[in-house]
Amino acid sequence: EAWLEAPGKGEGVLVAIVDTGIDATRDALKAGHEGLIDLTGAPVAADATADPHGHGSLMAGIIAGRGDGKKTGFVGVAPGARLLSVRVADERGGAPLHQVAQGILQAAERGAKVIYVGLGVRGRSKTLASAVAAARARGSLVVAPAGNDGLDQVRSPACEIGALAVGGEGHDGGPYLMSNLDPDLRLLAPAEFVPAPARGRACFTEGTSSASALVAGVAALVWSRSPGLDPAAVERCLL
């Protein structure tokens, strides 16, 4: 239904993936890859698009995979969108707060309308709150997972003012068992059996990272359909 409303399927929208990187050698991710901002200082492949962990590539595929037409044929939510890889996490998937914050800031500076942040920390963070506020002021929408701790507190940056927090919905229509929840959480998305492109095949992912990737893709569709909207208006469309 969203594709009927947004025939460009995300065309013209830059989506930043603040995560472990994007492996642009994967067929489903080649065409839409815009480039890399690497804040880790770690070695990367010769083409500077490596994802040593894999999480960022899976989430990028959910958001904007373009389908290779031969192997998986996988298509993401907004296959017309362009992807900016912002590598902040190491091969174990961990990242210091200042790197995540810097990734958000640099994504906004590069003109990303949707900034997907695939990781978070427990509790609130002034560092991440400041980055989210600055990105929002530049016209970007930060979309982030509530977290998979099964707690009643959403992780940061999702919990910060100006970010769109996404919790998980289970296959039965109720909350995903491991999703963090709190009274201010207003949006749930599927968090079980979410398809994503692995190397040469499709796989299924789960968790609030996958749920928020789905929402980030829909945000790109909304902006593609109505490029004049501000982040608050896009957020209202999603809610």
Image (spheres, grey):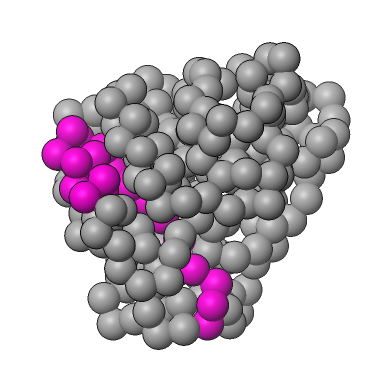
Does any portion of residue 129 appear in the rendered image? yes
Quick one: which residue is furthest to the top in this view? Answer: 46
Residue 85 visible (yes or no)? no
Which quarter of the figure has residue 114? top left
Q: Is residue 147 magenta?
A: yes
The stretch drawn in magenta includes residue 71: no
Image coordinates for residue 72, horizontal then vertical, percent: 80, 35
Look at 36% across and 38% down and name the residue there. Answer: 102
In the displayed orientation, state which residue is furthest to the front. Answer: 41
At 69% across and 45% down in the image, what residue appears? 91
**Frontmost residue, 127 versus 171:** 127
Compared across the picture, whether 234 is left or right of 194 comes to left
The quadrant of the rendering that contains the C terminus is bottom left
* Residue 204 placement (x, y as % from top left): 74, 56
Classify residue 13 by image quadrant.
Answer: top left
Question: Is 163 rendered above or below residue 171?
Answer: above
- Residue numbers of the magenta segment: 130-150
